[in-house]
Image (tube, rainbow, N blue to C red):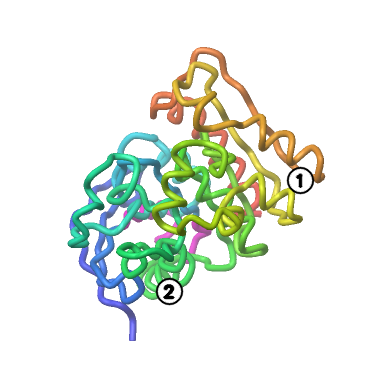
Amino acid sequence: MAAAITTLEQHRCFEGVQGFHQHLSATVGLPMRFGVYLPPQANDGPCPVLYCLAGLTCNEQTFAIKAGAQQHAARHGLVLVTPDTSPRATGVESADADWDFGTGAGFYLDAQREPYARHWRMESWLLQELPSVLEGAFPIRADRTGILGHSMGGHGALTLALRHPGRFQSVSAFAPICAPTEVPWGQKAFRGYLGDDTSAWAAHDAVQLIRGGARAPALLVDQGLDDQFLATQLRPERLEEACAASGQSLTLRRHPGYDHGYFFIASFVADHVVHHARALCS
């Protein structure tokens, strides 16, 4: 039986439909929201799907509203899926204490530490439950799947692709947290979700995964050089070093004058959609 989905809103968009939906997640134990953009080609049959993971403080609407990706997805016939970034209304008081941890900051992993272990199961929701929900309700090709992300979502795109080889045929990121075990955002999240044993953190760090032998399809990463978080939180040079040493294919583009926000993403999102379409739509 297909999972029950509640459609919260729908909008005509570049001859396709942008919708926002909710389902009761057995994995998370709470309602979870996600966006789906169906390009006009979906009227004629299933289309490849591109998961778009947002960053800290964001939700299922952020990328869909701000990135401007639908016009490019419509041109190439890609379904865009924008999952929420964490469970909501969890009843965990500490979840709302900080903007960079807890609500809006799931880091795309399954938490092991209480009180987060029950509901913060973002990796399992994204890779196991949500795809089956989507396949039962939307015309998508599960065998043609790509993933991209921004900031925390860029970390998610890289690590999920590296942790699950063969699951995604294309990968890209905007300003990802490349080496989370080495920076404050990642250390705070990993300690809170995974515990104090730092040996467990490496399994969710793209640089450490690549050094350990994990591989993904050719990576496209864009980074703004006026990004206020570049030196302290993102560390793309660490990803570059790891890929060069291991033979992992990486195209890292650095852009003078661009910061961390969605004006940067909107400026280059067309290139990312083309990157994914080349792998998924052939």
Q: Which of the image's four quarters has the N terminus? A: bottom left
Q: Is residue 181 above or below residue 10?
A: above
**Which residue is depicted at the point 30% across and 64% down?**
115
Query: In the rendering, at what x and y percent does residue 207 appear?
Result: 66, 44
Label 2 packing within 10 angstroms: few (<14), some (14-19), many (20+): some
Residue under label 2 = 132
Drawn side of residue 124 relative to residue 234, left or right: left
Outermost residue, top side: 257
Of the two numbered discs 2 and 1 on the same chain, state the one appearing first in sequence.
Answer: 2
Q: Can you identify the residue that label 1 sits on?
A: 248
Find numbered disc 2 in the image and state the secondary structure of the residue it sits on: helix
Question: Is residue 218 magenta-colored?
Answer: no
The amino acid type, in three-letter code, at marker 2 is Ser
Is residue 69 depicted above or below 27 in this figure?
A: above
In reply to whether residue 46 is colored magenta, the answer given is yes
- Label 2 and label 1: CA atoms lie apart by 30 Å
Q: Amino acid at mark 1?
A: Gln
Q: Position of residue 196 (x, y in %)?
A: 48, 55
Which quarter of the rendering shows the C terminus? Answer: bottom right
Left or right: 50 as drawn, with respect to 205: left
Check if mark 2's residue and mark 1's residue have beta carbons within 8 Å. Answer: no
How far from the left and from the top, in percent, is residue 13?
31, 44
Identify the residue at horizontal 42%, vertical 62% (top origin). 111
Give the residue at x 70% y 46%. 218
Say which element carries label 1: loop
Please state the extent of the stretch shown in magenta in the rendering.
34-49
- Res 165 quadrant in image: bottom right
Please tell me how crowded label 1 is: few (under 14), some (14-19), or many (20+) other residues with Cα within 10 Å: some
Q: How many marks?
A: 2
Question: Mark 2 or mark 1: which is in front?
Answer: 1
